[in-house]
Image (spheres, rainbow, N blue to C red):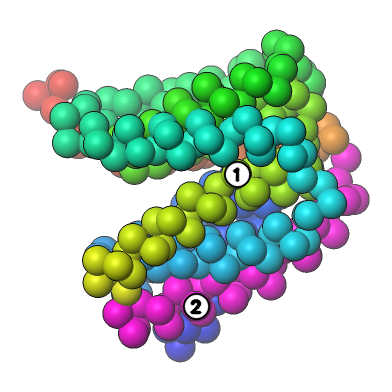
Amino acid sequence: MFYIFLALAGFMAWIVSTIGGGGGALILVPVVGFLAGAQAVAPVVTLATVIAGGGRLLAFWKSVEWRVVRWALPGGVLGGAIGAVLFSVAPAPWLQILIGLFLISTVAQYRLGRVERTFRVRYWLFLPAQAVVGLISGLAGASGPILNVLYLNAKITKGRMAGTKTAVSLPMHAVKLAAYAAFGAMSGQIWLFGLAAGLGAFSANWLARAWLERMPELQFRGVVIAVMAVCGAVMIWDQRALLAGLFQ
């Protein structure tokens, strides 16, 4: 039954992630933590992401904006490496709260998707932007779908957003998975848990693609912004103990 629940969780997570431009981990992480324990979360979710990301890249291959990938991928790798090095000395909890506030603010910035663009974007901006996001991810453990703001303003939406973001993130997740395996974090059961969640997520890609193809642009932007706001709220909630301490 554990494997069935993980597969269903992976399926739902990747439906949300594909249609909403991210945020699927909000579903998958607590399920993995409950079923497999906190220590299994990172390797299981990473393996599931690699499997599902491979399927998403196949499903959206023709929609990938490779000009963005060429700029964003080096920035993400560099930023992630620096963030990992600085992890032990940076105030990551406060950083996570600031990210959460920014993500929530996008509701006002885009008026729930009615505003199509808030600033103009050139492709080279994805290099420093992805470097910053990689840095934040390394420091805080997660950055939320911050970069969706850049994609929306570059008018890269729906299948183009899903495919392009996956082409940028998949190599980084593959490197993380290799590191987990090299340092002994991938036991036999972890592989099975990750495989179950990953296969469920893998199968979600084509259904999500069909929905995206029929979804109006305005509705898509509204969903993306709603997911960003929810991610922001969850990131702030995770730091509720830190915030509560300010009033004691």
Where residue 222 appears, x then y in whole percent? 72, 34
The extreme left residue here reads 248
What residue type is disc 2 on? Leu
- Is 127 on the left-hand or right-hand side of 135? right
Residue at the spot 46% in from the left edge and 67% down from the top edge = 47
Alpha-carbon span between mark 1 and mark 2: 22 Å
| SS at badge 2 | helix
Q: Is residue 21 magenta?
A: no
**Residue 145 in the image: above or below residue 206:** above
- Is 89 on the left-hand or right-hand side of 85? left
What residue type is disc 1 on? Val
Residue where numbered disc 2 is placed: 195
Where residue 24 appears, x then y in whole percent? 54, 53
Q: Quadrant of residue 151?
A: top right
Within-10-Å neighbours for mark 1: few <14, some 14–19, many 20+: many
In this picture, which residue range is highlighted in magenta? 187-216
- Is 92 on the left-hand or right-hand side of 192? left
Within-10-Å neighbours for mark 2: few <14, some 14–19, many 20+: many
Name the chief secondary structure element in magenta.
helix
Q: Is residue 240 visible?
A: no
Residue where numbered disc 1 is placed: 168
Q: Is residue 66 visible?
A: yes
Residue at the spot 90% in from the left edge and 50% down from the top edge = 214
